[in-house]
C-alpha cells in the first residue's frame, strides 16, 4: 500500500527532475523505517546518470521538501541511478536490451504460467514479446508485473 504522502512527494520530485533533464524511475517512501527512508532512482535523459545528477536532485528535493514541510519528521533521502540490474521500464531499455535473456512476471496466470523466461524481442502497446526456446510468446502488457534482465551469474 502506498503511503499517503507519496503522491505529493512524487509530484514535487518529478517537477525537479524535469528541470534537471532527469526521469524518476522509481520512488519509494518507507515510513515504517526509523527514520523514514525516501528512496528515488533517477535516470539522465541525455546520457549516463552521474553522481553530479544525484547530488543536484538530492539537494533541490531536500530543500523543497523541507521548505514545504511535506515530511513532518526527520527522514533519510537516498537518490541513486537504477543501474541495469533492475526492471526494464522505458522504451529505450526495451530497445537496448532486445535479444537479452529476461524474466517476465505476471499478476495473473497466463497460459498456465505467472513467470516466463526467454530472450526479449520487444514490446508494443499490447504485449511484451519474448522468444522462449524458439517459440514467440506475446504476454499482454496489462497483466505484466515486471520485466527483469535475467542474472546469469
Image (tube, rainbow, N blue to C red):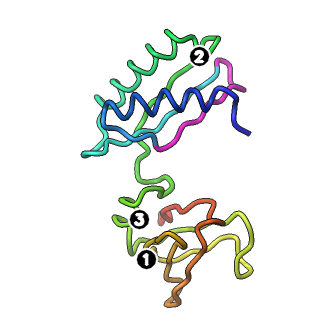
Q: Position of residue 17 (x, y in %)?
A: 38, 33
Give the CA distance from mark 3 to mark 2.
35 Å
Q: Which residues are magenta?
A: 25-35
Q: Quadrant of residue 69?
A: top right
> Which residue: 42% across, 35% down?
80
* Residue on which the image places disc 2: 70
Name the residue furthest bottom: 134
Q: Secondary structure at mark 3?
A: helix
Q: Quadrant of residue 71?
A: top right
Q: Position of residue 106 (x, y in %)?
A: 66, 66
Dot 2: within a 10 Å radius of its alpha carbon, few (fewer than 14), some, or many (20 or more) residues? Answer: some
Name the residue furthest left: 47
> Which residue: 60% across, 32% down?
7
> Which residue: 54% across, 63% down?
147
Which dot, 3 or 2, sits closer to the camera? 2
In the picture, the disc for residue 121 is 1
Q: Is residue 27 magenta?
A: yes
Q: Are marks 3 and 1 in contact (CB under 8 Å)?
A: no
Q: Secondary structure at mark 1?
A: strand
Q: Quadrant of residue 20?
A: top left
Q: Earlier in the sequence, mark 1 or mark 2?
A: 2
Q: Position of residue 53 (x, y in %)?
A: 31, 31
Q: Position of residue 126 (x, y in %)?
A: 54, 72
Residue 107, above or below 7: below
Which dot, 1 or 2, sits closer to the camera? 2
* Residue on which the image places disc 3: 94
Q: Secondary structure at mark 2?
A: loop
Amino acid at each position: 500500500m502506498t503511503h499517503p504522502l507519496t503522491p505529493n512527494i512524487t509530484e514535487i520530485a518529478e517537477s525537479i527532475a524535469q528541470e534537471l533533464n532527469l526521469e524518476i524511475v522509481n520512488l519509494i517512501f518507507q515510513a515504517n523505517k526509523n527514520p523514514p527512508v525516501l528512496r528515488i532512482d533517477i535516470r539522465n535523459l541525455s546520457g549516463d546518470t552521474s553522481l553530479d545528477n544525484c547530488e543536484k536532485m538530492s539537494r533541490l528535493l531536500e530543500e523543497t521538501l523541507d521548505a514545504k514541510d511535506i515530511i513532518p519528521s526527520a527522514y533519510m533521502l537516498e537518490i541513486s541511478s537504477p543501474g541495469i540490474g533492475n526492471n526494464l521500464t522505458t522504451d529505450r531499455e526495451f530497445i537496448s536490451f532486445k535479444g537479452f535473456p529476461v524474466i517476465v512476471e505476471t499478476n495473473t496466470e497466463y497460459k498456465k504460467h505467472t513467470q516466463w523466461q526467454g530472450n526479449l524481442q520487444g514490446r508494443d502497446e499490447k504485449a511484451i514479446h519474448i522468444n522462449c526456446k524458439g517459440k514467440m510468446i506475446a504476454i499482454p502488457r496489462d497483466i505484466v508485473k515486471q520485466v527483469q534482465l535475467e542474472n546469469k551469474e
